[in-house]
Image: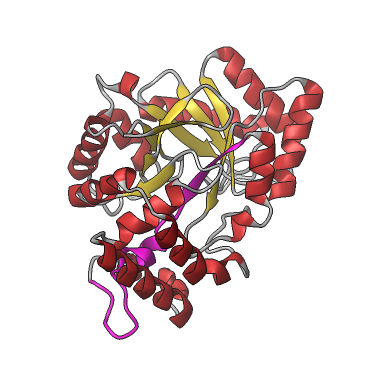
């Protein structure tokens, strides 16, 4: 396994991380625990979850999986998206964040999280309130590092400026949709992160499976795929994205890789990327994804991937999550 610094911090995270959005939803508890154990045994130390994944089941299952192995994990969770019907069950106010952190710690069966992330920018709460709250959490020992998620470049830069002005703990990382099918972060967010020493944690690195080779222009989606289990995902399946998926699959086959392996290897070697979080519902998916860590892309293959995906620097992001 390769390890990278998380932004300009001293924290080392595995180049391949484990996303756990499916735990308790598309992967049952026993399968999820086996996936976590395989990941840890294989050198993956970065586990990413959130307070709202599968209701709250993802955090609870991870708490079970890490019994006796908490010291092996860099554990990351999030809060800030809608967690209930009440007016204070969303956003990044001190009221909401403090309650959500305590609930997450209880479900995760731990007394601290390594990386606490604000799930999305909250236009209704002053950034100074959010950052002071996070600073207090770090001072209390319940949080070690803080990160952002789904922030625009200007929002993240504003937060870093306030932290510097006030002497608060600063964001060391940010999560964003980033893949061969979504290169929009390269326009503003990644240059800003390189300048400020903020690590990028891509989510949807396989564009929900489009870059795994499982979808085609002519055949029906596999029964267990996201397109079947989550019909709203079909909005991403169009000629443009499916053609990219087929082109990546063709290039991967020429070099003896799976499409997933090639796509992840490309992303791991992009500037500012600290850890690529990939979800899994089966042990076999983790085993396949692990191959990407050892792939050394030659300049010609990198150039071909850059060329076939260049158009995806423009347009809307593949995904972003904002407060309603």
Q: Is residue 113 above or below residue 202?
A: above
Quarter holding the N terminus?
top left
Residue 112: x, y in percent? 45, 20
**Image quarter of the C terminus:** bottom right
Specify the segment rendered in magenta: 198-222
Locate residue 95 relative to residue 203 in the image: left or right: right
Residue visible at 52% across and 55% down?
Answer: 177
Provide residue 14's location: percent of width, then percent of height.
Answer: 38, 34
* Left or right: 278 as drawn, with respect to 162: left
Q: What percent of the width, then of the height, locates residue 47?
A: 38, 35
Q: Which residue is depicted at the point 35% across and 48% down?
A: 296
* Horizontal relation, residue 176 to residue 220: left or right: right
- Outermost residue on the right side: it is 165
Was residue 315 drawn as part of the magenta stretch in this picture? no
Residue reaching furthest to the bottom? 218
Note whether residue 54 is visible: no
The residue lying toward the viewer, choosing from 249 and 26, is 249
Q: Residue at x 28, y 69 (%)?
A: 214
- Give the answer, above or below, for where 282 lies relative to 77: below
Please identify the quarter of the rendering in which residue 56 is found: top left
Q: Nearer the viewer, residue 34 or 246?
A: 246
Nearer-the-camera pick, 283 or 67: 283
Q: Is residue 301 above or below residue 30?
A: below
Residue that lies at the very extreme toward the top in this rendered image: 140
User: 22 and 107: which one is in front?
Assistant: 22
Colouring chosen for the image of the structure = secondary structure
Residue at image x 39%, y 54%?
298
What percent of the width, then of the height, locates residue 205? 43, 55
Q: Tell me if residue 298 can be seen.
A: yes
């Amino acid at each position: 396994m390769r390890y990278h610094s998380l932004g300009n911090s001293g924290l080392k995270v595995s180049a391949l991380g484990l996303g756990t959005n499916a735990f308790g939803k598309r992967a049952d508890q026993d399968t999820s625990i086996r996936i976590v154990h395989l990941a840890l045994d294989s050198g993956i130390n970065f586990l990413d979850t959130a307070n709202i994944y599968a209701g709250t089941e993802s955090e609870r299952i991870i708490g079970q999986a890490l019994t006796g192995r908490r010291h092996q994990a860099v554990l990351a969770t999030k809060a800030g998206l809608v967690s209930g019907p009440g007016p204070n069950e969303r956003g990044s106010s001190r009221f909401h964040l403090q309650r959500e952190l305590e609930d997450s710690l209880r479900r995760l069966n731990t007394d601290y999280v390594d990386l606490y992330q604000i799930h999305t920018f909250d236009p209704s709460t002053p950034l100074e309130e959010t950052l002071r709250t996070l600073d207090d959490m770090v001072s209390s020992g319940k949080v070690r590092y803080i990160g952002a998620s789904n922030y625009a470049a200007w929002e993240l830069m504003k937060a870093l400026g306030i932290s510097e002005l006030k002497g608060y703990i600063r964001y060391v990382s940010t999560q964003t949709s980033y893949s061969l099918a979504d290169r929009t972060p390269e326009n503003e967010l990644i240059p800003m992160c390189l300048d400020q020493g903020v690590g990028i944690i891509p989510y949807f690195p396989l564009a929900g499976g489009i870059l795994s080779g499982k979808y085609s222009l002519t055949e029906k989606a596999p029964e267990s795929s996201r397109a079947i289990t989550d019909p709203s995902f079909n909005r991403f399946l169009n000629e443009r994205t499916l053609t990219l998926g087929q082109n990546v699959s063709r290039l991967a086959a020429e070099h003896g890789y799976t499409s997933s392996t090639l796509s992840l290897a490309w992303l791991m070697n992009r500037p500012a990327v600290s850890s690529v979080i990939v979800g899994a519902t089966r042990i076999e998916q983790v085993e396949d994804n692990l191959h990407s860590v050892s792939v050394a892309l030659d300049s010609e293959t990198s150039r071909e991937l850059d060329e076939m995906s260049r158009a995806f620097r423009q347009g809307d992001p593949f995904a972003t999550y904002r407060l309603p």
